[in-house]
Image: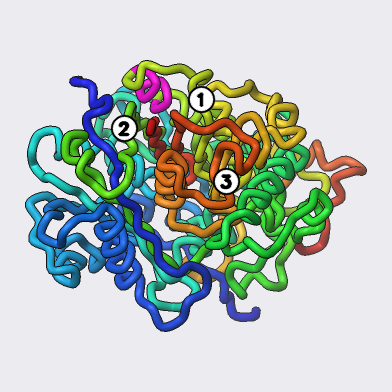
Amino acid sequence: MESLKNKVAIVGVGYTPQGRIPGRTAMSFHVEAARNAIEDAGLKITDVDGMLTQPPGGDTRIAPWNIAQQLGLRLRFGSQQSAMGASAGCMVLHAAAALIYGLADYVVCTYGESPLGGGSGPGTYGGGRGDNAAFGFYGASGGYALAAQRGIYEFKTGPETWSEIAVAQRKWANLNPMAMMHDRTMTDEDYYNSRMIVEPFRQYDICQVSDSGRAFVMTTAERARDCRHRPVYVMGVGQDHPSTDIVQADFMTGPIGAKVSGEEAFRMAGVTLKDIDACEIYDCFTYTVELSMMGYGFFGPGEGKAFFANGRTAPGGELPVNTSGGLLSEAYQMGFTLLTEAAVQLQGRAGERQLGPVTRTKEPEIMLVSGNGGVLTTHSTVILRR
Amino acid sequence: MTMYTKPLPDPTIETKPFWDYCKKHELRMQKCAQCGHIRFPPGIVCPKCHSMEAEWVKLSGKGKIFSFVIFHYVYNKAFKDDVPYASASIELDEGPRMMSNIIGCKLEDIKINMPVEVHFEDITGEFALPKFKPELKNRGKNLKPTAEV
Protein backbone atom coordinates (compact mmCIF):
# COMPACT_ATOMS: atom_id res chain seq x y z
CA MET A 1 0.00 0.00 0.00
CA GLU A 2 1.15 3.52 -0.75
CA SER A 3 2.14 5.26 2.48
CA LEU A 4 -0.16 7.92 3.84
CA LYS A 5 2.64 9.40 5.89
CA ASN A 6 2.45 13.18 6.26
CA LYS A 7 0.02 13.54 3.35
CA VAL A 8 -3.00 14.57 5.39
CA ALA A 9 -3.59 16.53 8.58
CA ILE A 10 -6.14 17.23 11.27
CA VAL A 11 -6.86 20.95 11.07
CA GLY A 12 -9.82 21.57 13.36
CA VAL A 13 -11.60 20.13 16.37
CA GLY A 14 -15.13 20.79 17.58
CA TYR A 15 -16.46 20.51 21.12
CA THR A 16 -19.93 20.81 22.64
CA PRO A 17 -21.18 21.07 26.20
CA GLN A 18 -20.71 17.69 27.89
CA GLY A 19 -22.24 16.00 30.89
CA ARG A 20 -25.88 15.44 31.72
CA ILE A 21 -27.58 17.79 29.29
CA PRO A 22 -31.35 17.46 29.01
CA GLY A 23 -33.27 18.85 26.08
CA ARG A 24 -30.75 17.90 23.41
CA THR A 25 -30.84 15.20 20.76
CA ALA A 26 -27.84 13.10 19.74
CA MET A 27 -28.25 14.61 16.28
CA SER A 28 -27.87 18.13 17.65
CA PHE A 29 -24.53 17.17 19.21
CA HIS A 30 -23.24 15.88 15.85
CA VAL A 31 -24.35 19.11 14.18
CA GLU A 32 -22.90 21.43 16.83
CA ALA A 33 -19.59 19.57 17.02
CA ALA A 34 -19.23 19.63 13.22
CA ARG A 35 -20.10 23.35 13.14
CA ASN A 36 -17.45 24.11 15.74
CA ALA A 37 -14.81 21.99 14.04
CA ILE A 38 -15.40 23.77 10.71
CA GLU A 39 -15.18 27.14 12.47
CA ASP A 40 -12.04 26.03 14.35
CA ALA A 41 -10.32 25.12 11.07
CA GLY A 42 -11.18 28.56 9.68
CA LEU A 43 -13.19 27.11 6.80
CA LYS A 44 -16.20 28.44 4.94
CA ILE A 45 -19.36 26.33 4.93
CA THR A 46 -18.93 25.72 1.21
CA ASP A 47 -15.38 24.36 1.68
CA VAL A 48 -16.50 21.17 3.40
CA ASP A 49 -17.39 18.39 0.97
CA GLY A 50 -16.79 15.19 2.93
CA MET A 51 -18.28 13.70 6.10
CA LEU A 52 -17.89 10.50 8.08
CA THR A 53 -20.34 9.90 10.90
CA GLN A 54 -20.36 7.35 13.70
CA PRO A 55 -24.02 6.76 14.57
CA PRO A 56 -24.54 6.21 18.30
CA GLY A 57 -25.93 2.78 19.03
CA GLY A 58 -26.31 2.11 15.31
CA ASP A 59 -28.97 4.82 14.89
CA THR A 60 -29.30 4.91 11.10
CA ARG A 61 -31.08 8.29 11.21
CA ILE A 62 -27.88 9.98 12.27
CA ALA A 63 -26.13 10.02 8.90
CA PRO A 64 -23.92 12.48 7.00
CA TRP A 65 -26.76 13.53 4.71
CA ASN A 66 -29.02 14.52 7.60
CA ILE A 67 -26.22 16.36 9.37
CA ALA A 68 -25.18 18.03 6.09
CA GLN A 69 -28.71 19.33 5.58
CA GLN A 70 -28.65 21.06 8.96
CA LEU A 71 -25.23 22.56 8.23
CA GLY A 72 -26.03 23.56 4.66
CA LEU A 73 -23.31 21.34 3.19
CA ARG A 74 -23.17 19.58 -0.16
CA LEU A 75 -21.14 16.35 0.13
CA ARG A 76 -19.01 14.60 -2.50
CA PHE A 77 -17.89 11.97 -0.01
CA GLY A 78 -19.88 10.61 2.92
CA SER A 79 -20.56 7.49 4.91
CA GLN A 80 -21.82 6.24 8.21
CA GLN A 81 -19.09 4.25 9.79
CA SER A 82 -18.86 2.26 12.96
CA ALA A 83 -16.08 0.13 14.32
CA MET A 84 -17.44 1.17 17.73
CA GLY A 85 -14.64 2.59 19.89
CA ALA A 86 -12.12 2.17 17.07
CA SER A 87 -14.16 4.33 14.67
CA ALA A 88 -12.32 7.65 15.02
CA GLY A 89 -9.00 6.02 14.10
CA CYS A 90 -10.62 4.08 11.26
CA MET A 91 -12.11 7.35 9.96
CA VAL A 92 -8.65 8.93 9.88
CA LEU A 93 -7.57 6.18 7.51
CA HIS A 94 -10.65 6.37 5.30
CA ALA A 95 -10.70 10.18 5.20
CA ALA A 96 -6.99 10.12 4.32
CA ALA A 97 -7.63 7.79 1.42
CA ALA A 98 -10.46 9.99 0.13
CA LEU A 99 -8.36 13.16 0.45
CA ILE A 100 -5.28 11.68 -1.21
CA TYR A 101 -7.32 10.35 -4.14
CA GLY A 102 -9.13 13.66 -4.55
CA LEU A 103 -12.56 12.38 -3.57
CA ALA A 104 -12.93 15.27 -1.11
CA ASP A 105 -11.07 18.44 -0.08
CA TYR A 106 -12.15 18.72 3.55
CA VAL A 107 -13.66 15.84 5.52
CA VAL A 108 -15.44 16.41 8.83
CA CYS A 109 -15.82 13.39 11.12
CA THR A 110 -18.59 13.47 13.73
CA TYR A 111 -19.78 11.77 16.90
CA GLY A 112 -22.55 12.60 19.36
CA GLU A 113 -25.01 10.97 21.70
CA SER A 114 -27.33 11.77 24.58
CA PRO A 115 -27.82 8.66 26.70
CA LEU A 116 -28.34 10.60 29.97
CA GLY A 117 -30.63 13.38 28.79
CA GLY A 118 -32.74 10.91 26.86
CA GLY A 119 -32.20 12.46 23.43
CA SER A 120 -30.98 9.13 22.11
CA GLY A 121 -31.66 5.79 23.64
CA PRO A 122 -29.17 3.45 22.10
CA GLY A 123 -29.17 1.31 25.25
CA THR A 124 -25.72 0.18 24.20
CA TYR A 125 -24.12 0.32 27.57
CA GLY A 126 -26.52 -1.47 29.86
CA GLY A 127 -28.19 -3.64 27.25
CA GLY A 128 -28.01 -7.40 27.16
CA ARG A 129 -26.17 -8.88 24.25
CA GLY A 130 -28.39 -11.43 22.48
CA ASP A 131 -29.07 -14.60 24.41
CA ASN A 132 -26.54 -13.44 27.02
CA ALA A 133 -29.29 -11.39 28.68
CA ALA A 134 -31.01 -14.64 29.68
CA PHE A 135 -27.94 -15.36 31.82
CA GLY A 136 -27.96 -11.86 33.32
CA PHE A 137 -24.81 -11.01 31.37
CA TYR A 138 -25.09 -7.29 30.70
CA GLY A 139 -23.28 -4.32 29.37
CA ALA A 140 -19.84 -3.72 27.96
CA SER A 141 -18.83 -3.94 31.62
CA GLY A 142 -19.72 -7.64 31.72
CA GLY A 143 -17.63 -8.41 28.65
CA TYR A 144 -14.51 -6.49 29.66
CA ALA A 145 -14.79 -7.79 33.24
CA LEU A 146 -14.85 -11.34 31.88
CA ALA A 147 -11.58 -10.63 30.05
CA ALA A 148 -10.10 -8.90 33.09
CA GLN A 149 -10.84 -11.86 35.40
CA ARG A 150 -8.89 -14.07 33.02
CA GLY A 151 -6.11 -11.48 33.10
CA ILE A 152 -5.96 -11.75 36.88
CA TYR A 153 -5.68 -15.53 36.52
CA GLU A 154 -3.06 -15.55 33.75
CA PHE A 155 -0.74 -12.69 34.60
CA LYS A 156 -1.71 -11.43 38.03
CA THR A 157 -3.08 -8.08 37.01
CA GLY A 158 -5.80 -6.53 39.14
CA PRO A 159 -6.81 -3.48 41.15
CA GLU A 160 -3.21 -2.71 42.10
CA THR A 161 -2.53 -1.96 38.42
CA TRP A 162 -5.91 -0.49 37.56
CA SER A 163 -5.97 1.97 40.46
CA GLU A 164 -2.77 3.55 39.14
CA ILE A 165 -4.43 4.08 35.76
CA ALA A 166 -7.66 5.52 37.19
CA VAL A 167 -5.91 7.87 39.63
CA ALA A 168 -3.41 9.18 37.04
CA GLN A 169 -6.19 9.98 34.59
CA ARG A 170 -8.21 11.75 37.26
CA LYS A 171 -5.22 14.03 37.89
CA TRP A 172 -5.29 15.00 34.21
CA ALA A 173 -9.05 15.64 34.40
CA ASN A 174 -8.50 17.91 37.38
CA LEU A 175 -6.50 20.15 35.00
CA ASN A 176 -9.21 20.10 32.33
CA PRO A 177 -12.12 22.52 32.92
CA MET A 178 -14.24 20.66 30.34
CA ALA A 179 -13.86 17.31 32.12
CA MET A 180 -16.92 15.96 33.91
CA MET A 181 -14.63 15.02 36.82
CA HIS A 182 -12.68 18.31 36.81
CA ASP A 183 -13.71 19.23 40.34
CA ARG A 184 -13.45 15.76 41.87
CA THR A 185 -10.12 14.39 42.95
CA MET A 186 -9.46 10.65 43.34
CA THR A 187 -7.08 8.95 45.74
CA ASP A 188 -6.05 5.32 45.81
CA GLU A 189 -8.41 4.93 48.75
CA ASP A 190 -11.28 6.46 46.77
CA TYR A 191 -10.61 3.92 44.04
CA TYR A 192 -10.74 0.96 46.42
CA ASN A 193 -13.83 2.36 48.15
CA SER A 194 -15.78 2.72 44.93
CA ARG A 195 -18.53 0.12 44.75
CA MET A 196 -18.26 -3.20 42.96
CA ILE A 197 -20.21 -3.13 39.70
CA VAL A 198 -19.21 -6.29 37.88
CA GLU A 199 -16.47 -8.06 39.75
CA PRO A 200 -13.55 -7.68 39.24
CA PHE A 201 -14.48 -4.10 38.19
CA ARG A 202 -15.24 -1.35 40.63
CA GLN A 203 -17.05 1.82 39.58
CA TYR A 204 -13.76 3.63 38.98
CA ASP A 205 -12.57 0.97 36.53
CA ILE A 206 -15.49 1.89 34.29
CA CYS A 207 -15.84 4.99 32.12
CA GLN A 208 -18.71 7.43 32.37
CA VAL A 209 -21.20 8.14 29.64
CA SER A 210 -22.10 11.66 28.64
CA ASP A 211 -24.43 13.76 26.55
CA SER A 212 -22.06 15.44 24.11
CA GLY A 213 -20.55 15.56 20.66
CA ARG A 214 -17.06 15.81 19.22
CA ALA A 215 -15.79 16.32 15.68
CA PHE A 216 -12.59 16.90 13.74
CA VAL A 217 -11.73 18.15 10.26
CA MET A 218 -9.09 16.65 7.99
CA THR A 219 -7.57 17.89 4.76
CA THR A 220 -4.48 17.39 2.61
CA ALA A 221 -1.12 18.56 3.93
CA GLU A 222 -1.06 21.20 1.18
CA ARG A 223 -4.43 22.72 2.10
CA ALA A 224 -3.67 22.36 5.80
CA ARG A 225 -1.07 25.10 5.63
CA ASP A 226 -3.80 27.66 4.94
CA CYS A 227 -5.97 26.66 7.88
CA ARG A 228 -6.26 28.70 11.07
CA HIS A 229 -4.20 26.53 13.41
CA ARG A 230 -0.99 24.54 13.13
CA PRO A 231 -1.74 21.28 11.23
CA VAL A 232 -1.40 17.95 13.00
CA TYR A 233 0.01 15.50 10.47
CA VAL A 234 -0.96 11.83 10.22
CA MET A 235 2.24 9.79 10.24
CA GLY A 236 0.80 6.30 10.40
CA VAL A 237 -2.45 4.40 10.76
CA GLY A 238 -3.43 0.78 11.24
CA GLN A 239 -6.47 -1.36 11.94
CA ASP A 240 -6.78 -4.87 13.31
CA HIS A 241 -10.08 -6.43 14.23
CA PRO A 242 -9.89 -9.71 16.16
CA SER A 243 -13.62 -10.10 15.39
CA THR A 244 -14.75 -12.67 17.94
CA ASP A 245 -17.30 -12.29 20.73
CA ILE A 246 -15.53 -12.05 24.08
CA VAL A 247 -17.21 -15.24 25.37
CA GLN A 248 -15.34 -17.22 22.70
CA ALA A 249 -12.31 -14.91 22.40
CA ASP A 250 -8.75 -16.20 22.57
CA PHE A 251 -7.49 -12.65 23.26
CA MET A 252 -8.99 -11.92 26.70
CA THR A 253 -5.43 -11.46 27.95
CA GLY A 254 -3.96 -10.22 24.66
CA PRO A 255 -2.51 -9.73 22.25
CA ILE A 256 -5.46 -7.60 21.16
CA GLY A 257 -5.65 -5.59 17.92
CA ALA A 258 -3.24 -3.01 19.34
CA LYS A 259 -0.36 -5.29 18.39
CA VAL A 260 -0.97 -5.72 14.67
CA SER A 261 -2.57 -2.29 14.07
CA GLY A 262 0.31 -0.73 16.03
CA GLU A 263 2.95 -2.53 13.98
CA GLU A 264 1.27 -1.29 10.80
CA ALA A 265 1.05 2.30 12.06
CA PHE A 266 4.63 2.38 13.38
CA ARG A 267 5.98 0.90 10.15
CA MET A 268 4.15 3.55 8.11
CA ALA A 269 5.29 6.33 10.43
CA GLY A 270 8.88 5.12 10.48
CA VAL A 271 9.13 5.63 14.23
CA THR A 272 9.40 3.38 17.29
CA LEU A 273 7.92 3.36 20.80
CA LYS A 274 10.84 5.47 22.00
CA ASP A 275 9.69 8.32 19.74
CA ILE A 276 6.25 8.53 21.36
CA ASP A 277 6.04 11.55 23.68
CA ALA A 278 2.54 10.90 25.01
CA CYS A 279 -0.39 8.56 24.43
CA GLU A 280 -4.16 8.77 24.17
CA ILE A 281 -5.30 5.19 24.83
CA TYR A 282 -8.93 4.08 24.53
CA ASP A 283 -10.05 3.65 28.13
CA CYS A 284 -13.60 2.39 28.32
CA PHE A 285 -12.18 0.40 31.25
CA THR A 286 -8.87 0.56 33.10
CA TYR A 287 -8.04 -2.94 31.87
CA THR A 288 -8.43 -1.76 28.25
CA VAL A 289 -5.57 0.70 28.81
CA GLU A 290 -3.39 -2.04 30.26
CA LEU A 291 -4.09 -4.53 27.44
CA SER A 292 -3.67 -1.89 24.72
CA MET A 293 -0.33 -0.66 26.04
CA MET A 294 0.80 -4.29 26.40
CA GLY A 295 -0.18 -4.82 22.78
CA TYR A 296 1.97 -1.89 21.65
CA GLY A 297 4.88 -3.33 23.62
CA PHE A 298 5.25 -0.70 26.34
CA PHE A 299 5.43 -3.51 28.90
CA GLY A 300 4.86 -7.25 29.17
CA PRO A 301 2.06 -9.24 30.84
CA GLY A 302 2.22 -8.70 34.59
CA GLU A 303 4.46 -5.64 34.33
CA GLY A 304 1.63 -3.10 34.29
CA LYS A 305 1.72 -2.28 37.99
CA ALA A 306 5.41 -1.40 37.88
CA PHE A 307 4.93 0.52 34.63
CA PHE A 308 2.13 2.77 35.90
CA ALA A 309 3.59 3.16 39.41
CA ASN A 310 4.81 6.50 40.74
CA GLY A 311 2.71 8.54 38.38
CA ARG A 312 4.63 7.71 35.22
CA THR A 313 1.56 8.49 33.11
CA ALA A 314 0.20 11.33 35.32
CA PRO A 315 0.97 15.07 35.10
CA GLY A 316 4.71 15.45 35.63
CA GLY A 317 5.31 11.87 34.50
CA GLU A 318 7.69 10.60 31.86
CA LEU A 319 4.97 9.16 29.56
CA PRO A 320 1.68 11.08 29.85
CA VAL A 321 -1.40 8.97 29.06
CA ASN A 322 -4.94 10.28 28.50
CA THR A 323 -4.17 13.90 29.16
CA SER A 324 -7.76 15.16 29.08
CA GLY A 325 -8.85 12.65 31.70
CA GLY A 326 -9.93 10.27 28.92
CA LEU A 327 -13.19 8.37 28.86
CA LEU A 328 -12.74 7.48 32.52
CA SER A 329 -12.64 11.08 33.75
CA GLU A 330 -13.26 13.58 30.94
CA ALA A 331 -16.29 12.55 28.86
CA TYR A 332 -17.41 9.79 26.53
CA GLN A 333 -17.31 10.51 22.83
CA MET A 334 -15.84 7.11 22.05
CA GLY A 335 -12.56 7.38 20.12
CA PHE A 336 -13.18 11.05 19.36
CA THR A 337 -12.31 12.06 22.94
CA LEU A 338 -8.83 10.60 22.58
CA LEU A 339 -8.09 11.61 18.99
CA THR A 340 -9.08 15.27 19.39
CA GLU A 341 -7.11 15.53 22.63
CA ALA A 342 -3.95 14.39 20.82
CA ALA A 343 -4.60 17.02 18.15
CA VAL A 344 -5.00 19.95 20.57
CA GLN A 345 -1.96 18.83 22.59
CA LEU A 346 0.17 18.78 19.43
CA GLN A 347 -1.19 22.19 18.49
CA GLY A 348 -0.21 23.53 21.92
CA ARG A 349 -3.78 24.59 22.73
CA ALA A 350 -4.48 22.46 25.81
CA GLY A 351 -4.31 25.20 28.44
CA GLU A 352 -3.63 24.09 32.02
CA ARG A 353 -3.14 20.48 30.95
CA GLN A 354 -0.78 21.36 28.06
CA LEU A 355 2.12 18.95 27.74
CA GLY A 356 5.41 20.77 28.19
CA PRO A 357 6.59 23.11 30.93
CA VAL A 358 3.05 23.78 32.23
CA THR A 359 2.66 20.16 33.34
CA ARG A 360 6.37 19.38 33.85
CA THR A 361 6.33 16.99 30.92
CA LYS A 362 8.05 16.74 27.57
CA GLU A 363 6.73 19.05 24.87
CA PRO A 364 5.10 16.59 22.47
CA GLU A 365 6.14 16.13 18.86
CA ILE A 366 4.73 12.66 18.24
CA MET A 367 1.70 11.06 19.90
CA LEU A 368 0.03 7.66 19.76
CA VAL A 369 -3.78 7.33 19.64
CA SER A 370 -5.40 3.97 20.34
CA GLY A 371 -9.02 3.04 19.58
CA ASN A 372 -10.76 -0.11 20.76
CA GLY A 373 -14.32 -1.23 20.17
CA GLY A 374 -16.91 -3.88 20.91
CA VAL A 375 -15.30 -5.95 23.64
CA LEU A 376 -11.70 -5.95 22.38
CA THR A 377 -13.27 -6.80 19.01
CA THR A 378 -11.94 -3.90 16.89
CA HIS A 379 -8.81 -1.77 17.09
CA SER A 380 -7.30 1.25 15.38
CA THR A 381 -3.97 2.98 15.87
CA VAL A 382 -3.04 6.49 14.71
CA ILE A 383 0.35 8.17 15.05
CA LEU A 384 0.24 11.97 14.84
CA ARG A 385 2.94 14.66 14.76
CA ARG A 386 2.93 18.40 14.93
CA MET B 1 -44.81 -21.29 40.32
CA THR B 2 -44.19 -17.55 40.17
CA MET B 3 -44.08 -15.80 36.83
CA TYR B 4 -40.69 -15.77 35.16
CA THR B 5 -39.80 -12.12 34.55
CA LYS B 6 -36.17 -12.32 33.42
CA PRO B 7 -35.22 -11.91 29.76
CA LEU B 8 -35.85 -15.02 27.68
CA PRO B 9 -33.52 -16.37 25.03
CA ASP B 10 -34.18 -14.72 21.69
CA PRO B 11 -33.76 -17.50 19.14
CA THR B 12 -32.90 -16.73 15.53
CA ILE B 13 -33.27 -19.20 12.68
CA GLU B 14 -29.66 -20.21 13.37
CA THR B 15 -29.92 -20.58 17.15
CA LYS B 16 -33.41 -22.09 17.42
CA PRO B 17 -32.20 -25.73 17.23
CA PHE B 18 -29.85 -25.07 20.18
CA TRP B 19 -32.73 -23.81 22.32
CA ASP B 20 -35.09 -26.55 21.14
CA TYR B 21 -32.57 -29.18 22.28
CA CYS B 22 -32.09 -27.34 25.59
CA LYS B 23 -35.84 -27.65 26.16
CA LYS B 24 -35.32 -31.44 25.91
CA HIS B 25 -32.39 -31.08 28.35
CA GLU B 26 -29.86 -31.91 25.67
CA LEU B 27 -26.79 -29.77 25.03
CA ARG B 28 -26.18 -29.99 21.30
CA MET B 29 -24.03 -27.93 18.95
CA GLN B 30 -23.21 -28.04 15.25
CA LYS B 31 -20.40 -30.36 14.18
CA CYS B 32 -18.95 -29.75 10.73
CA ALA B 33 -19.56 -32.75 8.45
CA GLN B 34 -16.34 -32.04 6.56
CA CYS B 35 -13.67 -31.23 9.17
CA GLY B 36 -15.36 -32.23 12.44
CA HIS B 37 -15.01 -28.81 14.09
CA ILE B 38 -17.72 -28.14 16.68
CA ARG B 39 -18.81 -24.51 16.53
CA PHE B 40 -20.65 -22.06 18.76
CA PRO B 41 -22.48 -19.74 18.40
CA PRO B 42 -24.49 -21.48 15.67
CA GLY B 43 -23.99 -20.35 12.09
CA ILE B 44 -24.47 -21.35 8.50
CA VAL B 45 -20.81 -22.11 7.67
CA CYS B 46 -17.93 -23.79 9.46
CA PRO B 47 -15.43 -21.04 10.42
CA LYS B 48 -12.55 -23.52 9.99
CA CYS B 49 -13.28 -24.96 6.51
CA HIS B 50 -16.37 -23.09 5.20
CA SER B 51 -18.36 -26.27 4.67
CA MET B 52 -22.09 -25.67 4.96
CA GLU B 53 -22.85 -29.24 6.03
CA ALA B 54 -23.25 -29.81 9.76
CA GLU B 55 -24.94 -32.09 12.25
CA TRP B 56 -26.26 -31.18 15.71
CA VAL B 57 -24.30 -33.55 17.96
CA LYS B 58 -24.96 -34.23 21.63
CA LEU B 59 -22.22 -33.01 23.94
CA SER B 60 -21.11 -34.43 27.28
CA GLY B 61 -22.31 -31.34 29.17
CA LYS B 62 -18.98 -31.26 30.98
CA GLY B 63 -16.45 -28.48 30.85
CA LYS B 64 -14.55 -25.99 32.93
CA ILE B 65 -14.83 -22.32 33.79
CA PHE B 66 -12.72 -20.28 31.33
CA SER B 67 -13.54 -16.97 33.01
CA PHE B 68 -16.34 -15.50 35.10
CA VAL B 69 -17.72 -12.27 36.51
CA ILE B 70 -19.89 -11.48 39.50
CA PHE B 71 -22.68 -9.01 38.90
CA HIS B 72 -23.29 -6.68 41.85
CA TYR B 73 -25.00 -3.95 39.84
CA VAL B 74 -28.59 -4.54 38.73
CA TYR B 75 -28.67 -3.88 34.98
CA ASN B 76 -32.17 -5.34 34.69
CA LYS B 77 -34.51 -5.18 37.67
CA ALA B 78 -35.62 -8.76 37.05
CA PHE B 79 -32.24 -9.72 38.55
CA LYS B 80 -32.53 -7.51 41.64
CA ASP B 81 -33.10 -10.44 44.01
CA ASP B 82 -30.27 -12.42 42.41
CA VAL B 83 -27.32 -10.07 42.88
CA PRO B 84 -24.59 -10.94 43.45
CA TYR B 85 -24.62 -13.72 40.87
CA ALA B 86 -22.03 -15.28 38.56
CA SER B 87 -21.99 -15.35 34.78
CA ALA B 88 -19.25 -17.31 33.09
CA SER B 89 -17.66 -18.39 29.85
CA ILE B 90 -17.73 -22.20 30.01
CA GLU B 91 -15.20 -24.13 27.94
CA LEU B 92 -16.84 -27.44 27.10
CA ASP B 93 -14.77 -30.62 26.95
CA GLU B 94 -15.53 -30.80 23.21
CA GLY B 95 -13.95 -27.36 22.66
CA PRO B 96 -16.53 -24.61 22.20
CA ARG B 97 -17.16 -21.91 24.75
CA MET B 98 -20.58 -20.62 25.83
CA MET B 99 -22.09 -18.05 28.19
CA SER B 100 -23.89 -19.41 31.23
CA ASN B 101 -24.36 -19.02 34.98
CA ILE B 102 -22.56 -20.88 37.77
CA ILE B 103 -25.01 -22.29 40.28
CA GLY B 104 -24.87 -24.68 43.19
CA CYS B 105 -21.83 -23.26 44.90
CA LYS B 106 -20.78 -20.22 46.89
CA LEU B 107 -19.56 -17.30 44.83
CA GLU B 108 -16.27 -17.20 46.71
CA ASP B 109 -15.59 -20.82 45.72
CA ILE B 110 -15.82 -20.14 41.98
CA LYS B 111 -12.43 -20.47 40.32
CA ILE B 112 -11.14 -20.40 36.76
CA ASN B 113 -10.56 -23.96 35.45
CA MET B 114 -13.03 -25.44 37.94
CA PRO B 115 -14.72 -28.52 36.38
CA VAL B 116 -18.44 -28.01 35.90
CA GLU B 117 -21.38 -29.87 34.39
CA VAL B 118 -24.58 -28.70 32.78
CA HIS B 119 -27.82 -28.44 34.72
CA PHE B 120 -30.94 -27.46 32.81
CA GLU B 121 -33.39 -25.08 34.46
CA ASP B 122 -36.90 -25.11 33.05
CA ILE B 123 -37.84 -21.43 33.14
CA THR B 124 -41.01 -21.39 31.04
CA GLY B 125 -42.93 -23.93 29.04
CA GLU B 126 -40.84 -22.90 26.04
CA PHE B 127 -37.33 -22.60 27.40
CA ALA B 128 -34.78 -24.37 29.58
CA LEU B 129 -31.52 -22.58 30.39
CA PRO B 130 -28.29 -24.60 30.38
CA LYS B 131 -26.58 -23.57 33.63
CA PHE B 132 -23.49 -25.11 35.16
CA LYS B 133 -22.71 -26.61 38.58
CA PRO B 134 -19.44 -27.85 39.99
CA GLU B 135 -18.99 -31.51 39.01
CA LEU B 136 -20.41 -33.74 41.72
CA LYS B 137 -17.07 -35.35 42.52
CA ASN B 138 -15.58 -31.88 43.10
CA ARG B 139 -18.29 -30.65 45.42
CA GLY B 140 -16.18 -31.13 48.53
CA LYS B 141 -16.34 -29.34 51.86
CA ASN B 142 -15.46 -26.04 50.27
CA LEU B 143 -18.09 -26.36 47.59
CA LYS B 144 -21.30 -26.82 49.54
CA PRO B 145 -24.26 -26.61 47.23
CA THR B 146 -26.62 -23.89 48.36
CA ALA B 147 -30.35 -24.41 48.35
CA GLU B 148 -31.12 -21.84 45.69
CA VAL B 149 -28.58 -19.72 43.86
Q: Which mark is residue A296?
A: 1
The residue identified by callout 3 is: A144
Give the answer, above or below, for where B125 lies relative to B114: below
Residue A322 horizontal side relative to residue A47, left or right: right
Identify the magenta region. Answer: A261-267
Q: Residue at x 49, y 32 (%)?
A: A364
Which of the two labelled residues, at mark 2 and mark 3, occupies the earlier sequence position? 3
Q: Is residue A362 shown above or below A200?
A: above
Q: Position of residue B75 (x, y in %)?
A: 59, 67
Residue A256 is one of the magenta-drawn residues: no
Above-or-below relation of A181 to B106: below
Mark 1: give few (<14), some (14-19) or many (20+) Cα within 10 Å: many
Identity of the residue drawn at 61% across and 75% down: B77
Residue A234 numbered tag:
2
Whether residue B113 is visible here, answered yes or no, is no
How many neighbours does mark 3 have within 10 angstroms: few (below 14), some (14-19), or many (20 or more)?
Answer: many
Image position, residue A230 (x, y; %):
33, 41
